Image (spheres, grey):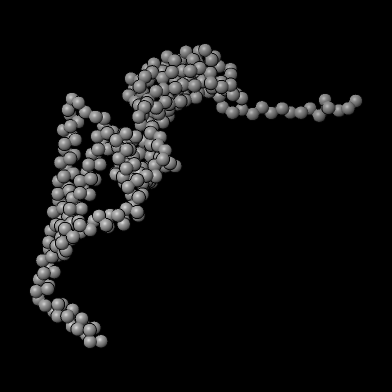
């Protein structure tokens, strides 16, 4: 009881000591000042890095825009990590000898290393994703079961935003299979149906001539669309297939535009696009009578 009373008395004396509160106030001001300066430095550094990449984009020798966007995000993230790590070290140095922390880092690192294997795996995987240019910021990719646009590639995680708005976050070490849709040109495939009563050769001629006029109106088309010919003989229609090579990930809007344009063209030339039909037969009971 005597030791407890002495301990409580010492705490009370410190709390009532004016010098103690002055030191606490000074330390609090220093911590706030360090964090504010770190935030300002990070903001300036990010802005400077962005300006460097803007200037670099005007150089005669440059890397691809995909690569530049990825490296820009990565360098900004790394800068943020380094600055705030140094700020935390400065704050800790106010309360303890930082050299003691560094000296004990080897023992602590050995202990933490066993529990940080996944973190190391994520960082190594992230390095190879960037080094091998597997995908970049802005690419449309499929990773595992998620599909969307790459929002950010960090040393530890990758963020994918789907077209419906969901944000998928993957540790880099968990990325096993990647499908990148943004590297090569895409292919728009459109099937158009013609009635059996129609003139197929005339329809092919009209469509072929019409396709020649499309690239000048649709910049996303890499070259003139091509009519492959009869794709299928359906129950009530002959199906013709048209393909168009487009810029990466532009095949869906181009396919929609092609369907509209082809429908308008065929209507203008009086070529019928068939619709489902039902034929009804009336049974004559008298013909089935047994004589």
Does the rendering let one see residue 268? no
Q: How many marks?
A: 0
Of the pair 75 and 223, the residue shown nearer to us: 75
Q: Nearer the viewer, residue 160 or 261?
A: 160
Toward the bottom, the furthest residue is: 2
In depth, the one of 140 and 164 nearer the eye is: 140
251 to 32, vertically: above or below:
above
Q: Quadrant of the N terminus?
A: bottom left
Quarter occupied by residue 4: bottom left
Q: In the visual, does 259 lie left or right of 138?
A: right
Toward which corner of the image does residue 209 lie, by quadrant?
top left
The image shows residue 47 at horizontal and vertical percentages of: 17, 43
Residue at screen point 22% across, 87% down: 2
Residue 177 in view here: yes
Q: Residue at x 50, y 24 (%)?
A: 191
The residue lying furthest to the right in this view is: 291
Residue 183 in the image: state x and y as whole percent. Answer: 35, 29
Report the residue at 55% width, 24% height from top. Answer: 274
Residue 105, image quadrant:
bottom left
Image point (53%, 15%), residue name:
200
Give the side of residue 95 with respect to residue 154, left or right: left
Q: Quadrant of the C terminus?
A: top right
Find residue 108 and report its horizontal and vertical position in percent. Answer: 27, 57
Q: Position of residue 172 (x, y in %)?
A: 35, 44
């Amino acid at each position: 009881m005597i030791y407890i009373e002495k301990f409580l008395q010492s705490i009370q004396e410190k709390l009532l000591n004016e010098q103690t509160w002055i030191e606490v106030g000074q330390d609090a001001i220093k911590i706030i000042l360090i964090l504010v300066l770190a935030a300002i430095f990070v903001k300036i550094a990010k802005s400077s890095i962005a300006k460097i990449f803007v200037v670099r984009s005007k150089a005669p020798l440059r890397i691809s825009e995909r690569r530049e966007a990825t490296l820009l995000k990565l360098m900004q993230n790394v800068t943020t990590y380094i600055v705030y790590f140094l700020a935390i070290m400065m704050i800790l140095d106010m309360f303890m000898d930082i050299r003691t922390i560094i000296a004990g880092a080897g023992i602590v690192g050995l202990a933490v290393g066993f529990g940080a294997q996944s973190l190391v795996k994520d960082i190594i995987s992230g390095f190879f994703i960037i080094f091998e240019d597997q995908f970049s910021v802005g690419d449309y990719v499929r990773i595992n079961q998620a599909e969307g646009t790459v929002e950010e590639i960090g040393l530890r995680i990758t963020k994918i935003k789907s077209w419906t708005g969901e944000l998928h976050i993957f540790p880099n070490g968990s990325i096993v299979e990647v499908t990148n849709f943004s590297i090569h040109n895409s292919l728009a495939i459109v099937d158009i149906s013609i009635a059996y009563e129609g003139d197929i050769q005339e329809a092919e001629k009209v469509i072929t001539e019409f396709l020649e006029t499309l690239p000048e109106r649709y910049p996303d088309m890499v070259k003139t669309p091509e009519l492959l010919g009869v794709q299928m003989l359906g129950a009530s229609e002959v199906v013709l297939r048209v393909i168009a090579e487009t810029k990466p990930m532009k095949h869906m809007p181009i396919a929609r535009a092609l369907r509209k344009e082809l429908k308008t063209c065929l209507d203008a030339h009086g070529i019928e696009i068939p619709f489902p039909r039902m034929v009804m037969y009336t049974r004559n009971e008298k013909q089935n009578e047994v004589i």
